[in-house]
Image (cartoon, rainbow, N blue to C red):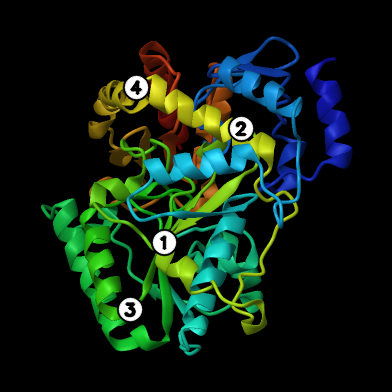
Amino acid sequence: MRNADLVARGLKSVWHPCTQMKDHETLPLVPIKRGEGVWLEDFENNRFIDAVSSWWVNLFGHSNPRINAAIQQQVSELEHVILAGFTHEPVVNLSERLIEVTPEGLNKCFYADNGSSAIEAALKMSFHYWKNLGKPGKKNFVNLSNSYHGETLGALALGDVGLYKDTYQPLLMEVITAPSPDAYNAEPGETDEAYALRQFEAMEKLLAEKHDEICAVVVEPLIQCAGGMRMHHPIYHTKLREACDRYGVHLIADEIAVGFGRTGTMFACEQSGITPDFMCLSKGLTAGYLPLSVVLTTDTVYDAFYDDYETLKAFLHSHSYTGNPIGCAVALATLDIFRDDNVIEKNRQLSRCMAESVAHLADHPHVGDIRQHGMTLAIEMVKDKASKTPFPWQERRGLKVYQHSLTREALLRPLGNVVYFMPPYVITEEQIRHLAQVATEGIDIAVKG
C-alpha cells in the first residue's frame, strides 16, 4: 500500500480528533504502518521519532516486547468480565501495586476507561461524599486559570483553555477559577517559588470565603500540559493541601499526563510531599497501549459510601470496560519495567541531556522561555523577547515547526507557539540531540516573516 492510498480512503471515512479537517486539503495526513521503540514508520519506509509519545501516552516505546508478551498471555486466559459482582486477578494485582507506588493513604482504586472519565468519576465522588455526610450545599468546584482536564462535559467545565471550552460554554456547569501559579508570568527577578506563593494568596482567600459551598479544588500538578506546557513550583500544592485540610475541601490531583515519571518523580505530587484526596491516572498507566484509567482515593472517602443499600449512598457509576483484564495486565507490565529497570534514575540523565541540547536557544531573539520538569521540556516562541509578546495564534507558527520536523525524521506537534519534547523513556541521547537540532531549525523557519 502507498501512503496516498490509505490517506485518500481515510479522508472519506475518518473524522480525526482535535483537527480542522479542511486543513488536510493542503496538509497531508501521515499514515503509520508500524512502530518500534521511539520510531514510527509509514508505508513508504519514512520514519519519525515520536517526540510527543503519541499524545503523551507512550513510555517504553512502540511494540515493547515485555508489554506485548503480557497482552498475549492475558488474552489467552481472560479478555474481559463485568467488574460489578465479579473480580479477577489482574485488577486485584494492579490495585495492590498502585497503592504501593502512589502517595501514602491512597488505598482504594476505582477504574474507568480514559482520563476524562476518571475526572468525571472523581467529581461525582467528591460531591456525593459531601452529600452522604449531610452537606449537599457543597457542590462547586475550583480550578486554575489555563487548566485543562479533558473533553467530556464535566471535565471540560473544569478547564480554562478557551480554544476547547468556549464553544460549549452554554452546556457546562459553572466553576470558580483561581489564578494559576504558572511561573511564566513571574515578575523579572522573582523566583518560581516566590511567584507560586504570591499566587496562592488568591486561592487562600477564595477557600476562606467559599469553603462551605466547595466540594474540591482540581489541579494539574507542576505542568499545565494542554495549556501550553506551562509549569510551576511544587510549593503551591504543598500550601494548597494545607489549606484544603484547614477549610474542609477535597484536593483532586489530575496526574493523567504528568504521572509515571514525566516530571522527574514517579508522581508529580511527590515533589510537594502531599497526598491528594483523589488522584486521577491514565495515559502512561498502560504505557500507551490500551485505554484505562483509575481514580485512587482514601479510606475516609470510601467509608462515606459504605452502608446498607437502602440508604442510596453507594457510588452507582460504571463503564462497560471498567477494570479490563488486558488493560490491567499491560499496566502491571508497565509497573514491572519501572521496578526492574531503574527508570526514574535513568530519566534524570536523559533530562539533563534534553536541557543541554536546547540551552543555546536561551539567547534566541524569538524564544521567550525554556522550561522543564523532568522528561517534559518546552520552548515558547514569542514575537518580542523582552516583553514576551506572543505571535498571533492565527499565524500558526507552531505548524511550521511540525511540517519541518516531518522532513527530518521527527514528530514534533507544538501546542500553538510552544515546541515541546515529551518522548518515550527509551529514547537515546543521540536521538534527543537530533530532536533539538530539528526544533532549532523549525523555530528559525517559523519565526521568519
Q: Is residue 363 left or right of residue 25?
A: left
Look at the image and tell me in which quarter the N terminus lies: top right
Against 431, residue 161 (above or below) is below
Q: Earlier in the sequence, mark 3 or mark 1?
A: 3
Q: Which callout, 3 or 2, points at the residue further toward the start of the chain?
A: 3
Q: Which residue is mark 2?
A: 329
Can residue 144 be seen? no
Secondary structure, mark 3, is loop
Callout 1 amino acid: Thr
Asked if the residue under mark 2 is in contact with the one under mark 1, i.e. CB atoms within 8 Å, the reply is no
Horizontal side of 349 relative to 13 (left or right) equals: left
Name which of mark 1 and mark 2 comes first in the sequence.
1
Q: Label 4 belongs to which residue?
A: 342
The amino acid at mark 4 is: Asn
Cβ atoms at labels 4 and 3 below 8 Å apart: no
Label 2 Cα neighbours within 10 Å, binned few <14 / some 14-19 / many ≥20: many
In this rendering, position of residue 40 left or right of residue 189: right
State the SS at label 2: helix
Report x, y in % for residue 230.
Answer: 36, 50
Q: On the image, which quarter does residue 367 sit in? A: top left
Q: Front-most of 302 and 274?
A: 302
Q: Nearer the viewer, mark 3 or mark 1?
A: 1
At label 4, counting other C-alpha atoms closer than 10 Å, the crowd grade (few under 14, some 14-19, many 20 or more) is few
Q: Residue furthest left?
A: 189
Mark 3, residues whose alpha carbon is within 10 Å: few (<14), some, or many (≥20)? some
Point out which mark residue 298 bears: 1
Distance, label 1 to label 4, CA atoms, is 28 Å
- The CA distance from mark 4 to mark 3 is 38 Å
Mark 2 near mark 4, Cβ–Cβ under 8 Å?
Answer: no
Amino acid beneath label 2: Ala
